[in-house]
Amino acid sequence: MDLPRIFTIRESSHRIHNPLTADKLATLGDSLRLAPGTRALDLASGSGEMLATWARDHKITGTGVDISTVFTEQARARAAELGVADRVDFIHGDAVGHIADQPVDLAACVGATWIGNGVAGTIELLDRSLRPGGLMLIGEPYWRRTPPDEQTAKACHATAIADYQELPDLIGQFQDLGYDVVEMTLADQDSWDRYAAAQWLNMRRWLDRNPDDELAPEVREGLTTEPAGYARSTREYLGWGVFALMKR
Ligand code: SAH
């Protein structure tokens, strides 16, 4: 049970495995007005940057769960580096069906709503760990502009145009599920570049060091085709944001 190695190669330099920059992640944390001692659960916590920096900046405590051994180790190292290892805990494991032992004040899934088979199921999953009146965070793509054809949607790593909605409709979906949208922090094209373009240098450096690796042809192909493909598709059409929700 682990994240396929291709992702840890591509995102080897990333602390944040989503299209928010460190500044935007900090803005999101500030926007939530977290009280010291807030207890958080972060499903698919990646390299732990959200919990670790918010533990430092807002004195929250929390647990992250992620299926990647590499990212989980990086998360523990980051917590130690920031001096918050006593406040945050990172568990290597499957977040599917994961429910906190004690209800938390903040329950998050940022960039991994497949763990609940989509937005609705992930909200249901997080709700089972959340205390009444708690905050939920969902990180999810939306269409900045609906792609003109299915081929463009696929170039944005969607399976179909129908995978995502435009921003007002995504917000409407949260509301239809019985939640108020109480805050949001959105990626922009520049912050997308920090996530996507940063992968290209990781890939090139890795290729130079590992020319005979079995994944080398795939990484080479990605590095050759992706920059233009990204500029044509994802950068133009795919939006991404973290939405803070409270049950009505
Ligand atoms: N929330 C983090 C990571 C987002 S990337 C951040 O924003 O930085 C998606 C993450 O989902 C990866 O870290 C991957 O390892 C994790 N993941 C994928 N499937 C998972 C599962 N079933 N259970 C737990 N984590 C999972």
Image: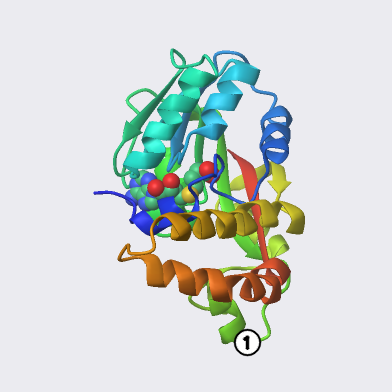
Q: Nearer the viewer, residue 173 or 226?
A: 226
Q: Residue 26 appears in which quarter of the rendering?
A: top right
Is disc 1's CB within 8 Å of ligand 1? no
Amino acid at pointer 1: Asp
**Residue 156 in view in this figure:** no
Q: Please rate how many residues cluster around mark 1, counting C-alpha atoms within 10 Å: few if below 14, some from 14 to 19, many from 20.
A: few
Against 6, residue 78 (above or below) is above
- Which residue does the image show at 58% across and 56% down from the upper left? 201
- Which residue does the image show at 55% across and 38% down from the upper left? 136
From the viewer's perspective, tell me whether residue 78 is left or right of residue 243.
left
Image location (x, y in percent) of residue 150: 57, 85
Q: Residue 127 appears in which quarter of the rendering?
A: top left
Q: Which residue is mark 1?
A: 149
Against 161, residue 50 (above or below) is above
Against 36, residue 42 (above or below) is below
From the viewer's perspective, tell me whether residue 90 is left or right of residue 56.
left
- Which residue does the image show at 41% across and 40% down from the upper left? 71
From the viewer's perspective, tell me whether residue 197 is left or right of residue 203.
right
Q: Residue furthest left?
A: 1
